Amino acid sequence: MQICSMSVSSFPSAPQLFRVRHGNSLGFPKVTCNEKEILGGGSKNNNRTMFLLGFGYVAQFFAKELIKDGNWKVLGTCTSTTKKKKLEEMGLGVQVFNSSDNEVSCLNSLTDATHLLVSIPPITSGDQVLDRHWNLLQSKLCNENLQWLCYLSSTGVYGDCGGAWADEDYLTKPMSDSGKARLVAEKQWLNLGHDLGVSVQLFRLGGIYGPGRSALDTILKQRSLTDSQRLRGARQYTSRVHVADICEALRASIRKPSSGRIYNIVDDDPASRAEVFAFAHTLIEKKWPGQIKTRNYSDMSGSNNQAQVQPGQKRVSNARLKNELGVQLFHPTYRSGLESIIKSMENPFH
Ligand SMILES: NC(=O)c1ccc[n+]([C@@H]2O[C@H](COP(=O)([O-])OP(=O)(O)OC[C@H]3O[C@@H](n4cnc5c(N)ncnc54)[C@H](OP(=O)(O)O)[C@@H]3O)[C@@H](O)[C@H]2O)c1
């Protein structure tokens, strides 16, 4: 497997990182991982290996940052050989893995992981990676190497909060099948972490945007909105977060792993999608006048009834992210996020 590593780092060195042991208060099953190995603590070597289970949008962005930071081996998985090839061209070490596969020797290098970031979304019954490969993951990760395990979840687990602010202690009551599956998956990863003696960093992400994935891109591609986008567009509040801020939160969590805390990863400004699209439109119009059709985004729902209450309304709080992880957002609002994206965009009309 191809491996990336550089020499300079802004991350703490391995000995500063630590395993956080769980108590029994959560009612988890007895720890089955070799206690002697765990209590030995720390990695055998000083190398840090980030294993990205699912080289998705966030993981790719993060991988590039780690490579730039240096002193990391970055390994990970994707589901197709075509994507593997593209990722390898970017200098990443990649294995093809599909959670529905039975043959998973491609996961053997998990043994080397000092850090594991999980981006693979659940299927309706829960997390397919753990449903099918629990024993394998447990055996590969049950060593003194693994120090940090982060599962990327979604604010969808809160369901409809009637427009109220939802912090991490807010009752989870997902309405959608995907929200319900996500909650099951969160518990499964917490259980694995408990078995391994490693605390799981649980990140509940708002709608992810960034370069190549934003309202600007949707407008520029002149795509018509899907039904689900229209429905979400009609919501008064939608939590979102710029991918650079997710990476910042990941770095903060690596520096200061918590013992099983959940963090909402969202910006300060849960504005409606209609508002975001209108702003994106203005930015494009300013930079490339007369190139896109005028549009009234207040009609995003396809309904004239703006007072119609859409399900899933919530304002997600990021107070814990700031107070405990000490994260200062690069993009506290969609405005600065979109401005930074358009600034580095090449002219799409040439
Ligand atoms: N998009 C959002 O706004 C949003 C909001 C909240 C939470 N989230 C969740 O946050 C996480 C990170 O988001 P993201 O946007 O970076 O995700 P993403 O780009 O959709 O990436 C998902 C990754 O999972 C892999 N994957 C999917 N199904 C798989 C399977 N059956 N077996 C193995 N690998 C599989 C994909 O591989 P391939 O690409 O090779 O197929 C991809 O690498 C995801 O779990 C996502 O669902 C997303």
Image: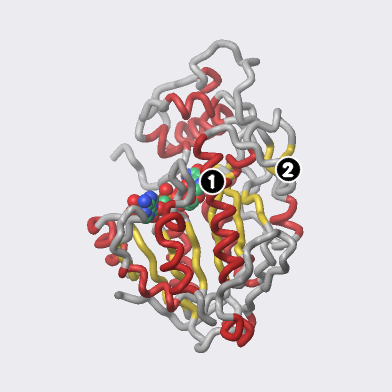
Image: 268 above or below 114: above
Q: Nearer the viewer, residue 215 or 152?
A: 152
Q: Residue 123: x and y, percent? A: 43, 45
Q: Nearer the viewer, residue 208 or 8?
A: 208
Report the amino acid beneath label 2.
Tyr
Asked whether, in this view, residue 100 is left or right of residue 333, the answer is left
Helix, strand or loop for disc 1: helix
For the image, the number of numbered tags is 2
- Residue designated by label 2: 170
- The structure residue drawn at horizontal position 45% and vertical position 38%, both measured from the top left corner, is 216
- Quadrant location, the C terminus: top left
- The structure residue drawn at horizontal position 73% and vertical position 43%, both measured from the top left corner, is 170
Q: Nearer the viewer, residue 6 or 190?
A: 190
Q: Residue 229: x and y, percent? A: 47, 29
Image: 226 above or below 138: above
Residues marked 2 and 1 touching at CB (< 8 Å): no
Mark 1 Cβ inside 8 Å of ligand 1: yes
- Residue designated by label 1: 182
Q: Residue 348: x and y, percent? A: 33, 40
Quarter of the view holding residue 316: top right
